[in-house]
């Protein structure tokens, strides 16, 4: 891949070029659908470790060395393993990076991961920040996994996060406020405590009633209980132009005592007329903090930050099938539709 002349997010064809040039390699062949319009899905490797604490590597320290210091026991992901809620794990990823000059990366949880309240963050050697991969980084990458509400079953090849690659420092084109829709009878879901295990590779394989309870607002308001996890929907449709990508950012703590959206990437074409998806809404993953909070219809709960692509992607979000294009309020793909 030749170095892009302008700063921006790399589209799918540029990610394919990086793979062809072995700037991105993998322990097993890449899946046909692994490259998204402006991101790359990452896959779990063969091993994970239950660790006693989260950590960041110090300058000059490799992640593998720190794992040895904090690991409690090792899990064989080739046979599948249950990752228990309330515990922290570090897992190998199959992909390895050798980024060229001028190219860096940032990771986020996949939508399906955030919607079941699994907190994941990327780790790379000699990088004192989660999710960010330095320009020109060469080495392995790892994932911290912390299930918050549900225990999950994962295995080698399970995709829990995604990587967005960028040339230079893309400018912030626009920032839009995202409000919450509490005007409808079924406005959201609250996660049930002490539910069963979610198989992260079993699509439409779980009865949502075993894991969620529906929420009906009163007078356009919803009371968020401390420590509970909610799935809500944006008030207005979301559109990501074909030459842009966006990231949902958590709300300023001064606006409310809650966190929104673990999974932040929106690929080009989401909600667009060109992709046949006008009217698509953002699904919001909401966790209240220490105090109860009364949420009102239309209240701003997050912000979308738009950045340019370096080129038009050769495919748009949802082409070839997507669980979330043209969505309204929707649970993760692991659950059958509500009411079925």
Image: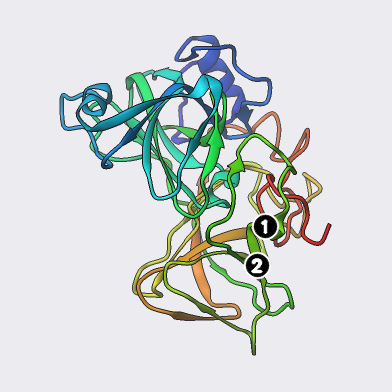
The answer, for residue 147, to whether it is visible in the render is: yes
Q: Where residue 257 appears, x then y in whole percent?
A: 39, 73
21 to the left or right of 330: left
321 to the left or right of 192: right
Q: Residue furthest top?
A: 21
**Nearest the camera: 209 or 9?**
209
Quadrant holding the C terminus? bottom right
Residue 107, above or below 42: below
Mark 2, residues whose alpha carbon is within 10 Å: few (<14), some, or many (≥20)? few
Q: Residue at x 55, y 10 (%)?
A: 20
In the rendered structure, are the residues bearing label 2 and label 1 in contact, judged by CB atoms less than 8 Å apart? no
Chosen colour scheme: rainbow
Residue 257, above or below 106: below
Mark 1, residues whose alpha carbon is within 10 Å: few (<14), some, or many (≥20)? some
**Nearest the camera: 34 or 10?**
34
Q: Residue at x 47, y 75 (%)?
A: 225
Q: Residue furthest bottom?
A: 219
* Disc number for residue 171: none
Q: Where residue 323 appears, x then y in whole percent?
A: 73, 44
Q: Where residue 320 appears, x then y in whole percent?
A: 78, 33
* Disc number for residue 210: 1
Q: Residue at x 81, y 62 (%)?
A: 339
Q: Which residue is mark 2?
A: 213
**Element type at mark 2:** strand
**Nearest the camera: 62 or 190?**
190
In front: mark 2 or mark 1?
A: 1
Q: Residue furthest right?
A: 340
Q: Tell me which corner region of the image, top left, top right, bottom left or bottom right, holds residue 138.
A: top left
The answer, for residue 103, to whether it is visible in the render is: no
Q: Where residue 156 appears, x then y in whole percent?
A: 54, 23
17 to the left or right of 259: right
């Amino acid at each position: 891949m030749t170095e892009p002349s302008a700063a921006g997010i790399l589209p799918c064809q540029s990610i394919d070029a990086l793979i062809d040039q072995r700037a991105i390699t993998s322990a097993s062949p890449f899946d046909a659908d692994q490259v998204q319009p402006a991101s790359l899905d990452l896959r779990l490797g063969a091993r994970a470790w239950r660790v006693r604490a989260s950590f960041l590597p110090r300058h000059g320290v490799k992640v593998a060395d720190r794992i040895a210091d904090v690991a409690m026991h090792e899990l064989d992901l080739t046979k599948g393993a249950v990752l228990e809620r309330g515990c922290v794990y570090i897992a190998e990823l199959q992909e390895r990076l050798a980024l060229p000059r001028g190219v860096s990366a940032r990771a986020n949880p996949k939508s399906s991961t955030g919607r079941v309240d699994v907190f994941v963050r990327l780790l790379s050697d000699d990088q004192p920040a989660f999710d960010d991969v330095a320009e020109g980084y060469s080495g392995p990458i790892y994932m911290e996994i912390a299930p918050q509400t549900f225990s999950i079953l994962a295995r080698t090849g399970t995709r829990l996060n995604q990587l967005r690659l960028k040339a230079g420092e893309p400018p912030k084109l626009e920032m839009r406020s995202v409000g919450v829709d509490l005007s409808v009878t079924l406005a959201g879901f609250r996660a049930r405590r002490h539910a069963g295990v979610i198989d992260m590779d079993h699509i439409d394989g779980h009865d949502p009633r075993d894991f969620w309870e529906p929420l009906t607002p009163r007078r356009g308001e919803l009371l968020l209980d401390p420590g509970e996890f909610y799935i809500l929907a944006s008030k207005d449709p979301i559109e990501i132009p074909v030459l842009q990508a966006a990231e949902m950012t958590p709300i300023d703590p001064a606006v409310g005592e809650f966190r929104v959206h673990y999974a932040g990437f929106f690929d080009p074409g989401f909600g667009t007329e060109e992709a046949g998806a006008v009217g698509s809404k953002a699904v919001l993953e909401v966790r209240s903090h220490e105090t109860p909070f009364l949420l009102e219809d239309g209240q701003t709960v997050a912000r979308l930050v738009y950045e340019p692509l370096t080129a038009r992607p050769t495919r748009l979000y949802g082409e070839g099938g997507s669980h979330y294009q043209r969505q309204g309020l929707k649970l993760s793909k692991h659950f059958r539709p509500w009411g079925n």
